[in-house]
Amino acid sequence: MKYNYKIYARALVFALEEAQNLAQKEKVIKNFLFLVQKNKDTRQIKKIIDFASRIIYKKEGRQRIILETARPQNNLKNLFQKFFNEKDIIEEKINPNILAGLRIVFDDEKELDFSFKKRLELLN
Amino acid sequence: MEELIQALGIDWKLLIAQAFNFALVLIVLRLFVYDKILKVLRERKKKIEDGIIKSEEAEKRLKEIEGLKLEKIKEAEKEAKELFLKSEKKARETEEQMLLRAKEKESEILAQAEIISQNKIKESETVAYQNLKNLLKASMLQLLNFKPEAIDEVLISEAVESLKKQKNEI
């Protein structure tokens, strides 16, 4: 690992901001991926993209909200959309580890845990 | 008178000679013996007087010694009494201290017993509480296996209510 994923992410965001149009942005992304590959840091690519997304969302005043459930739920996004800003990105994620219920994660930083697993932990 | 003297057989010449002899003996005694006898008598008298004085002194000293003896005995008695009282006081103090220590020890033991008892109660409460929690957990897990969707619904509704409440507070 040549650089930390946060450094890559900040560099990518900075380069994308500097790009004038879509073509330049595509070129920036292509060059960035080439650089990561060259530095043999491709294993960090998911982390880099997640962190870069968070930086961009933050700059735009948006939040990335993940609704984690143990099994697929109908209409979950619509049910919670009204509690957040329209600009916020809401994603659904299946996480069997929570056993049942719901866990809401905001920008990978804070969370509201209404999971069954949490209830069991509280009994310990 | 003369008849009477004759009847008594007194011979004047003989009487004068005897008077002379007596006077001579008296002079000789006065000159050579009287002073010596007087000196001896005086010395004797002095010795007797000294003896009497010494005896008186001795008697006085004896009385003083008796007095001192009595005084010493009284002092010794007083000291013995004081010593006895002191020992008695000390013994009482020691007894009181021992009683106090015994009471402290008793209190300590009682406190320890109380702590142990409380700890045992707490321990048993903890065990009971833990058993109850385990039972509850097992029940919850059974319920989860039986109707997971129902639990999802309840917990998701709870999340919605919580967010609603937060939004209203803002």
Image: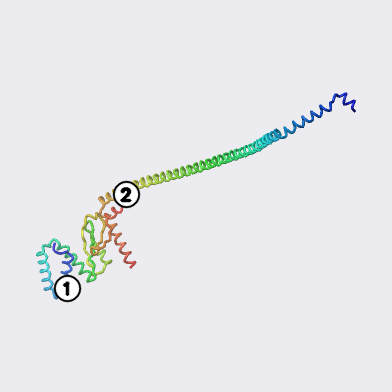
Q: Specify the amino acid type for callout 1.
A: Glu
In the image, taking residue A30 as reference, residue B1 lies left or right, namely right
Residue A107: image quadrant is bottom left
Front position among marks 2 and 1: 1
Rendered view: B142 above or below A24: above
Residue, disc 1: A17
Q: Quadrant of the N terminus of chain B?
A: top right
Q: Quadrant of the C terminus of chain B?
A: bottom left
Percent of width and height locating residue B158: 30, 59
* Pick the front one: B157 or B24: B24
Q: In this figure, which colouring scheme has been used for the structure?
A: rainbow
Check the residue under mark 1 and report the chain it is in: A
How would you rate the neighbour count of disc 2 (Cα within 10 Å): few for under 14, some for 14-19, many for 20 or more?
some
In the image, taking residue A100 as reference, residue B71 lies left or right, namely right
Q: Specify the amino acid type for callout 2.
A: Lys
* Pick the front one: B66 or A90: B66
* Pick the front one: B138 or A12: A12
> For the point 25% across and 66% down, which residue is it?
A81
Residue sticking out furthest to the front: B13
Q: Are marks 2 and 1 on the same chain?
A: no
Mark 2 touching mark 1, by CB under 8 A? no
Percent of width and height locating residue B161: 31, 62
* Pick the front one: B28 or A50: B28
CA gap, disc 2 and disc 1: 54 Å
Residue A76: image quadrant is bottom left
Numbered badge on residue B133: 2
Check the residue under mark 2 and report the chain it is in: B
Percent of width and height locating residue B77: 58, 39
Rendered view: B157 above or below A86: above
